[in-house]
Amino acid sequence: MLNMIQKRKTLFLRSILIKFIIISFLGILYLFFYNVQVSENKETNLFGLIVNESRYLAENRKDFEKKNDKDNNNNVDNFGVRGSKNNCEGISKLFVGCKKGFKKIWDKISCDFLCNEKMDSNNVNNYNNIENNTCSINNDLLTKETEVNDLNVKKVDDDFICRNINKNCVNEINNMNEEEDSKIIYSWDLGRESLGKLLDSSKNFSINGVKYEDWEMTPIATCGASRIKEKCQQMYKVVIKSKEKNNEMGNNKKMGNCNDFDKIKGNDNPGDDEIKLFMKKVPIDIWVKQYDLMKEYDGEYLSVGENFVMESVVLAFLNEYHPGIAPIFYKFLYEPDMNYDLNNNCDEKNTYVIDIDNNLDTFNEKLREQVNNNKKGYVVMVSELFGEDVFDYTISEKERLETEEWFEDVKKILFKSLKLLIRLHDAGITHLDLTPENILIKKNFDIRFCDFGKSAPVYTTKLRHTKEMNKTILFESCQPNIGKNPNTPPECWDLFLKYDSLNVEDPLDYLKSIKDPDERKIYYFDVRSADKYMLGIFFIFLWNDGYLWDSAEMDDDDYSKFINSDMNFDSFELTKSWPNDLKVILKQLLDKNNRMNLNFNDLVLHPWWSYKN
């Protein structure tokens, strides 16, 4: 009897235990699915809030602008401008900028401070600690957007600018991660090493079996808007017919000896049976002088004119470590002048040939011997002839396209130029001559920068060319003669006029007498900020098909009107109809206080790029 009771008791307890386990399991499942649903609802609500507010602002924009138009019509002025006035009427301009009512929304979706650019002027360790571009927006939401749209980090179509704000953020992060390159930052030593690998003699050089001396060179005019009238370089376009149509692309090879170039296809079209090259020749006496000065200043010499040594070193560095910013740099040649020497003495036995190794210092000393012996010759930069410059591109394409289609293309060019300048700065180089003539483009909107004769490093260890620091700091320049007149920043014009009043021709030479870095400060400017201003002027040129002023001086009537209006584009009839968000971006790039603290990545994530005009 007792055994029966004990068995029933055991069975009863077992049944209770099993029921408890089942109920607990069901409870856990319930909590799990409930939390997932809540999380998804929160994400949906967050995204819905952003979209709804964007729609609300867009729908109310017309009323907002009408009200402002009435207020502004009483105070409308006209620019006395060069360039045609764009007809922007009839083009939709969605209000998605950083107006007061939208600022908080933009801050959420623009991935606040992707790579914080506000570095201590004496310390850039923060830059070196940046491993990856990250986004402050809800990571789960970004992950969900990425999965839904099946975005590929390696392949993002830049021509399809997203129509959805969060997807835009994801795409830009993917692009930046793809383009972060090798994280190798420019230095004078690295640049010289890269250029040394490309050294060769024109006597030994051929492409596709065609010797250098047999190339047909078409001269390119060197005239321009530069304040320096005399130009000592010679530029040429070269077209070489391929002997074999089915050759392998030589561009994928490392640039070593001349045999690397025996098989190169056409640059513009993989099916072309010709190779198009751009060449720049510089007299060896000019090269030797500039190289000596660059060595004296540890690669930080600032030339009044073009610095051909800096240009060559930068092109070689970008070619090796950051391809895709500048055209491919194939070779750096020494070409002896066989037709003339200073004594009018040409000797067939004297071939002017010098032995060339990969050491740039040794190469320069051998060139010095040639100069000392009254021998003439050239150093020759041989690079890819990439597309056409934006100045010429706008002339042909604007006539071909309808107005609305043209402005969509302009926006793509502006966007890609912005991203390319970010890459250049991330590589440790500033351009300082950003003009429509120095930005190259192909029909597929592939873009490159060229003409680095005014370029400067982003980083240095010497404070204003004097005090050696025990850390890396941001580079500043004392040479205001950068860019063309309309593109030069106002701080450079102020410095230019200051030097002019002091009869200073060479700023570095003048500043040798001023040893204290703080006293020298008034003669220096931020090179990154100067690039930002030039980019803003480029934006204006492209959108307006011309500049708004001749120079950023108060003596220029158009510029002074603009400054006196507090850079209010709505105060002028020509610019009043421009997209509001473009005007916001331009003010960020042009106003000195704004651009000094401007993070380029914030502009990349501005919602204006996501919408049609």
Image (tube, rainbow, N blue to C red):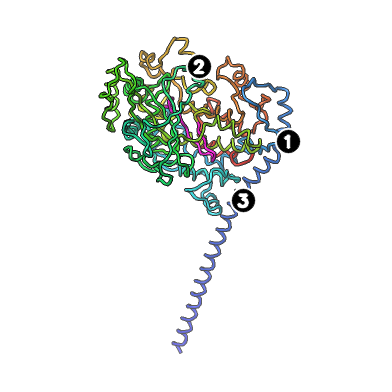
**Residue 527: image location, x then y, percent:** 45, 26
Distance of label 2 from label 3 (alpha carbons): 52 Å
For the residue labelled by badge 1, is the local secondary structure a helix, a strand or a loop? helix
**Pick the front one: 277 or 136:** 277
**Pick the front one: 35 or 463:** 463
Q: Nearer the viewer, mark 2 or mark 1?
A: 2
Measured along the vertical axis of the image, is residue 87 above or below residue 466? Answer: below
The reply to whether discs 3 and 1 touch (Cβ–Cβ < 8 Å) is no
Q: Which residues are magenta?
A: 439-455
**Residue 343: image location, x then y, percent:** 30, 15
Name the residue carrying label 2. 494
Distance of label 2 from label 1 (alpha carbons): 42 Å
User: In the rendered structure, which amino acid carries the disc numbered 3?
Assistant: Asn
Which numbered disc flags the more N-terminal residue, 2 or 3?
3
Q: Nearer the viewer, mark 2 or mark 3?
A: 2
Q: Nearer the viewer, mark 3 or mark 1?
A: 1
Name the residue carrying label 1. 63
For the residue labelled by badge 2, is the local secondary structure a helix, a strand or a loop? helix
Name the residue carrying label 3. 45
